[in-house]
Amino acid sequence: MIALFALLASSNASAQEPVDIGVVQQSDVRVVQRLLYPKDGRTEMGLHVGWMPFDALLTTPNLAFSFTKHTSEEFGLGAWGQAGYGIANGRLHELQSPSFGVTAEAYRYLASVGAGVEWSPIYAKMTTNGKRIWHYDVFAIARGGASLGSSIIPGGGIAVAPMAELGVGTRVFTSQNAAVRVGLTDAVLLEHRKLTDSTYLTQHVNVTIGIAALSPAKSKGK
């Protein structure tokens, strides 16, 4: 009797027609993931060391401070202050040597300030040796500001230049309130030089690494 009931139930189930749910559009497919290290509504302060290695005549170590207010997980508003000092590299020493005796018109970087926006379209995680999982994001920045430089020639004067800067970087989270930041920026300056009374477009490409402290994250109940 039990076997007969099971057979009838199986026959009824197999006789049911499949349910047509239609075509699933690409826009309907979403990956939902709870962010372990959210940024929305938090402030971030960072301290960074940098190096401008690509100038033809000068190499420039620098130190920077950053402040970012994250208005969402993707966007933030920030400010940046930086100071450094251009040091003559081997090529400049060679030009200034008795063999050549050339006085180069070069302006060393001294400081800059800027403000702009940050866009973080990527949040991801990776693993090292299958043991440690790292959470990180990838961001792009766009800033405007001003830069200060001085001539390497005595009496050559100071140059204050408007500046536009673009960059990319990554933020690797080490805890809920701390991260390591690595970045690459390219600043274009419109620099007027007193020594020759001329205006130049110059570039400062800067590589930075630093640490950042984030304010406490929003509580889940708010």
Image (tube, grey):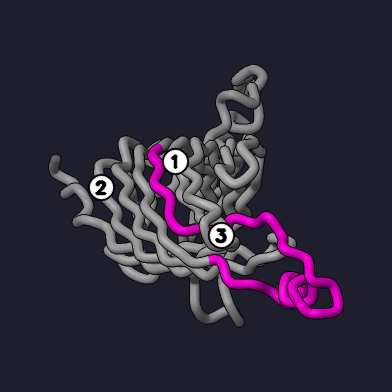
Residue 108 is labelled as: 3
- Image coords of residue 22 (percent x, y): 64, 17
Residue 146 is labelled as: 1
Q: Is residue 2 visible?
A: no
Residue bearing mark 2: 42
Marks 2,1: beta carbons within 8 A: no
Q: Is residue 19 magenta?
A: no
- In the rendered structure, which segment of residues is drawn in magenta? 86-115
Give amino acid for label 2: Arg
The C terminus, quarter of image: top left
Picture layout, residue 211 above or below residue 149 = below
Give amino acid for label 1: Ala
Residue that sits furthest to the right in the current view: 99
- Image coords of residue 83 (percent x, y): 41, 61
Which residue: 58% across, 36% down?
Answer: 190
How far apart are labels 3 and 1 at the CA level?
A: 15 Å
Front in this rendered view, residue 1 or 140: 140
